[in-house]
Image: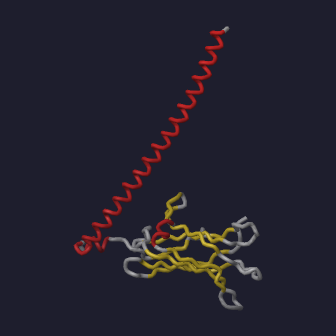
Amino acid sequence: MIMAAALCTALATGCGSFKRVSSENDRLRARVMELQQQNLDFTNRTAELEARLLRAVNNSDVAQDVRDATPHVATLSIDAISHVRDDNGDGRPDTLMLYVTPSDGLGRFVQMVGDLSVHTAMLPTDSDAVTIGRIRLGPRELRDAYRSTFLGTHYTITMPISVPDDSHPTGFTVKAEFLDGYDGRRVTDQRELSLVLDP
């Protein structure tokens, strides 16, 4: 009887120890994965900074055919899937989800480096235009807005809008303007979007 009790106690103690060891191993594995990801991020960032430094040092020596083949933003497109949302639940649109796609001279996606300004306004036929939203993204913010998903590669801009309480419009105009950070060129696009919330 005493031996059976001792055996049960030993087994219970062993199970508790096993659970603690297993839990500690799980924590260590998660930490290792986190450190590996951090190391990869640092490696990628270092490689990018080295490329940037080399480009700055050797910029004057770049061959003309390389310059000619370097892609630049030629057109800007506000995607038709851009839409409004009601984030505070009052039944009125208060957020614009804007999807912008830049293309080079060959019609292919190219990343933007510079500033992106967005202006949204209602254009009633019987009165002046009414601004309902405006935003400007600097180079770092614009880079953070880059997305590549099953919907495609684009920039996603989430911006607040404010529709006057005394108006019942069904649409508005949005204009996006990209200012190239390297050469100061401006590329714009404009599109009519609906203010009707998607049920």
Which color mode does the image show?
A: secondary structure
**Does 16 sit left or right of 137 as displayed?**
right
Q: Is residue 66 above or below residue 27?
A: below
**Does 47 sit left or right of 12 as displayed?**
left
**Does 163 sit left or right of 29 as displayed?**
right
Residue 53 drawn at (x, y percent): 30, 67
Q: Can you say which quadrant of the picture contains the C terminus?
A: bottom right
Residue at 38 percent of width and 59 percent of height? 45
Res 179 → quadrant: bottom left
Residue 93 drawn at (x, y percent): 70, 72
Residue at 47 percent of width and 76 percent of height? 115
Tell which of 110 and 26 is nearer to you.
26
Residue at 69 percent of width and 87 percent of height? 124
Tell which of 124 and 50 is nearer to you.
50
Q: Is residue 22 above or below residue 139?
A: above
**Does 75 sit left or right of 164 as displayed?**
left
Res 12 → quadrant: top right
Q: Is residue 184 above or below residue 160?
A: below
Tell which of 113 and 29 is nearer to you.
29
Residue at 46 percent of width and 69 percent of height? 140
Residue 66 drawn at (x, y percent): 27, 70
Residue 144 drawn at (x, y percent): 49, 65
